[in-house]
Amino acid sequence: MTQSLLNNVSTLKETASQTAGPYVHIGLAPKEAGFDIFEKNFTNVLAKPGTAGERITIEGRVIDGSGTPVRDVLLELWQANAAGRYNHPADTQNKPLDPDFRGWGRACSDFETGLYRFDTVKPGAVEGRNGRLMAPHVNLWIVARGINIGLSTRMYFSDETDANSKDPVLNLIEWEVRRKTLIGQREQRGTQVVYTFDIRLQGEGETVFFDI
Amino acid sequence: MTETNVRAAEYIQRDWTAHPPAYTPGYKTSVLRSPKNALISLQNSLSEITGPVFSSDELGPLDHDLIMNYAKTGLPIGERIIVHGFVRDEHGRPVKNALVEVWQANAGGRYRHKKDQYIAPIDPNFGGCGRMLTDANGYYYYRTIKPGPYPWRNKVNDWRPAHIHYSLSGDGIAQRLITQMYFEGDPLIPTCPILRSIPNEEAIRALIAPQDTQAFIALDSRAYRFDITLRGARATLFENRVVGAQS
């Protein structure tokens, strides 16, 4: 049979990714670039005064293959509300939506320290594929100069040992030693609950990234 | 089969041959910022097929007009252009209500950013960013000044072709994309290390916007057309779970 008799279903090709570059702040967080242009800005504060759930901070650094913090990174966080439901029409789980919670935010690492931070609430567990419950987690997307295509990962919570041990996604990671790269470590700082989550782009302790 | 069996769509597996790999030594910054391990492939769950939904009341009336949205004492300097196009998925379906965010250098190739030290001057009347939502047909448009090329530290005499950065948020976070649009005929395109990080000529061509003479505004602005394709969703038509059985 000749090769020319093989027909292909025609689809469009996804547009190629390109790096966000060093000046990503101009477009996605102009105040960080050093100027004020939009009336309303997207921020790293997801929790509003009326939002239901435990107030938490997620904080950490993105670290390159030399061990140096990346200080020009932008992260986006997407999560379910405290009841475990995403604020999106495709989520039809029988759980309440929270009118005071979108579940999405955007943060930039500090230009000096490299620290990023989100102020949010702890999400509830969400139903995974075929009805298997996923442990509570937040979804993170990371872009920066030198990152050619945005990196997707998840942060799970250190105080959810039991749920984490049954999580279908964590269990998909063949190397148990790598699963711990996805666990944010809980600590109490005064009245604040902080989860520390460092993301290692390369080398020892490299964070697990997903093809989603 | 009833409609209730049709569940929210998951996305077709990404075609990685259309994208730059993480490690592209010609673009030096990628060397220490590229994961070495293989990505773990996930079948989509609610976490990936959902994403933030944006509404027009979050945007201002001039957010898509880069000529006017930072004009302080007069109009910005440079060539006036319209950029427009459609955001579709891999099946050619329009992606409605997608958030399109753009940013760019000014006509001299200088960014309004505290870390940009290039000698070309800041334009006091140009911010360099804009944003808009696609309409029911996936259509978007904005007005701006054509950006200039500029030098950057990669090799010592590397120059970026003129480009506009794009960020796209579609229906689910699995569609999230950042890219750059280039201008037809720019002689810096063939040697750009960032463009050359893409191993596929067809994919590179798709980032080069042709001039669109029919969309010119007479005695005012030229126009470029830039269509964008995000990942396509498929319907999950069948469930494998037996109702009442232990999962």
Image (tube, coloured by chain):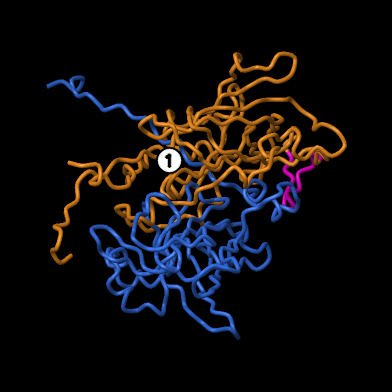
Which amino acid type is shown beneath numbered disc 1? His
The residue identified by callout 1 is B19
Q: Report x, y in % for residue B197.
A: 48, 40
Chain B painted colour: orange
User: Is residue A130 part of the magenta span, yes or no?
Assistant: no
Which percent across, then down, holds residue B201?
A: 44, 29
Q: Position of residue B113 (x, y in %)?
A: 73, 49
Residue A14 picture quarter: top left
Q: Main secondary structure of the magenta part?
A: loop
> Is A86 or B223 nearer to us in this picture?
A86
Look at the picture and state if A21 lies above or below B91.
Answer: below
Q: Chain A colour?
A: blue
* Residue shown at the point (44%, 32%) measured from the top left: B94
Chain under numbered label 1: B
Q: Report the number of numbered marks.
A: 1
Q: Residue furthest bottom?
A: A190
Q: Which residues are magenta?
A: B110-121
Q: Is residue A47 left or right of residue B150?
A: left
Which picture quadrant has residue B85? top right
Up-down: is A120 above or below B186? below
User: On the rendered image, what quadrant is the N terminus of chain B found in?
Assistant: top left
Image location of residue A48, percent across then percent down: 59, 66
Q: State the image quarter where residue A7 is shown.
A: top left
Q: Is residue A93 left or right of residue B236?
A: right
